[in-house]
Amino acid sequence: MASENSQLHILFFPFFAPGHMIPMTDMAKLFAARGVKATIVTTPLNVPFVSRTIERIETHGGATATATAAKVDIQTINFPVEKAGLPEGCENFELLPSREMSSSFLKALAVLQEPFEQLLHDIDYHADCLVADMFFTWATDAAAKFGIPRLVFSGHSFFSTTAWESVTRYEPHKKVLSDSEPFLIPNFPGEIKLTSMQLPSFIREEVETDMTNVLKEAAEAGMRSYGIVVNSFYELEPAYADHYRKVFGRKAWHIGPVSVCNKEAQDKAQRGKESSVDEHECLKWLNAKKPNSVVYICFGSFAYFNDSQLMEIARGLEASGQQFIWVVRKEKNGGGKEEWLPQGFEKRMEGKGLIIRGWAPQVLILDHEAVGGFVTHCGWNSTLEGVTAGVPMITWPVFAEQFFNEKLVTQVLKIGVEVGVKRWLQGVDAVGEESIKKEAIEKVVKRIMVGEEAEEMRSRAKALGEMARRAMEKEGSSYSDFNSLIGELKSRCP
Ligand code: UDP
């Protein structure tokens, strides 16, 4: 049904984790900036996470807050966590008391279908489309009940989406003799090699778990959905974008990098959680450095390492002789004891290295000209933010689809080097015997920061960064695909 003034109204329903809420909030801002009425649906305890990003919030009491500047509304639905068997207040993936509960959390999302449908029923301003995260496996059916199309957001690239499909469909890992024998991803552009050890445990092992069931349901609901929206740009992965559309025959719109909507330093600093460092102090520190002279190290919102791995990172950074900003998620890393730092490390590194304990304003840092390299866990948001910033990367994948992203960065785009992680990990605290040693870290940090190879990677990375920004400008590939999506959605409205 058309809205009263024929303004399109889109609901965005992100999964409750920073790596999903951040890009979807950016996406909602982008739609709002192009005249679409955008509403983010979330749960009460997740509101601050979204509202921080959207400027000038006015709370109109109760369950609704309106962000006037970006014209993004927020609507809340209750998450009966106890009914779902989760601890009280556990409304975000980050708040899980243990990794073992990840699957239970995903399964628990089923309890949201009823309150979500109630919201669709009650909402004042009729919605024309629902963009819902892949993990809300019931969302296609919920949207269908109200006669609106459901678009899927997975937070992944075309590359990893198609790689994942090829691996699950053709099971190349079952045709090798050992976990460490490389295989080619079948029926997939480029000669991309992986090993079984780098695949998620739930693909490798054939046991049915809550996780495999949720993923199966998500894939099935995805097939019945209207299509997918991808936080990527065509020039970054043309072969894989084409492959997805032609071979899998599904509708997809690339509308990224969505982080580009954050133009001002303040916008970049406000993304996601509150920064653990004063952004002005951080900028002052960076302003004093030469271009491309600082390496930035951050492993996203969810991965964390044990003390011995952190110690190796500290020693490797010091040995590399490079300046750095290193983000350490302090709540999981030994609290106040800090047994993960070599003695006198911070004193020796004064002025040369900055440790951010907690949350960093990542895009603000990456976009600074002083930053010349990025050590990343290859979460898709971080990878794309690194691409957009035009910096070479050291790839250090941990879990999820991060090993696929590593291959895109190192084997296809050739803008990064692998640190050498061999094994996909479910419980990241298990990093121990197989930890990456100081010498390897020192070597790769030097490789991306200094020398001819570094310069070559940097110039490729810079060119991609420019393409990324152009894609979002008028007539750019993402801008145009965005227009096609809006046009198509409008044409469905009577
Ligand atoms: N992020 C940030 N500061 C931090 C850690 C992460 O701003 O200290 C942001 C980062 O910019 C990215 C998101 O959180 O947008 C993390 O998403 P990603 O897909 O890279 O990894 P995940 O956290 O999902 O593993």
Image (cartoon, rainbow, N blue to C red):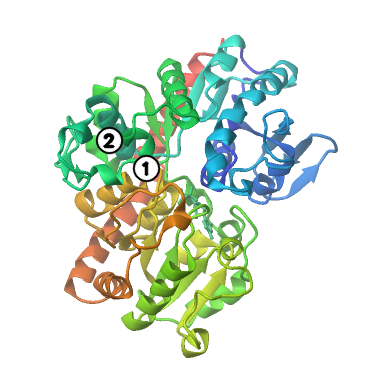
User: Where is residue 322 shown, x and y percent of the image?
Assistant: 36, 80
Q: Label 2's element?
A: helix
Q: Residue 313, image x and y in percent?
A: 40, 72
The mark found on residue 163 in the picture is: 2
Q: Dot 1: within a 10 Å radius of its alpha carbon, few (fewer than 14), some, or many (20 or more) residues?
A: many
Q: Residue 387: x percent and y percent?
A: 35, 55
The residue type indicated by label 2 comes to: Ala
Residue at position x 67%, y 36% from top?
A: 86
Q: What's under tag 1, amino acid-wise?
A: Glu
Residue at the extreme right? 61
Question: On the image, numbered disc 1 is attached to which residue?
Answer: 401
Q: Which mark is residue 485?
A: none
Q: CA distance from mark 2 to mark 1?
A: 9 Å
The answer to whether marks 2 and 1 mark residues whose Cβ atoms lie closer than 8 Å is: yes
Task: Count every numbered label the image shows and give the total.
Answer: 2
Position of the N terminus, as image quadrant, is top right
Residue 122 drawn above or below residue 108 = above
Q: Nearer the viewer, residue 453 or 435?
A: 435
* Up/down of 242 relative to 118, above or below: below
Residue drawn at 39 percent across, 79 percent down: 315
Residue found 44% across the figure and 56% down from its top:
430
State whether residue 475 appears in this view. Answer: no
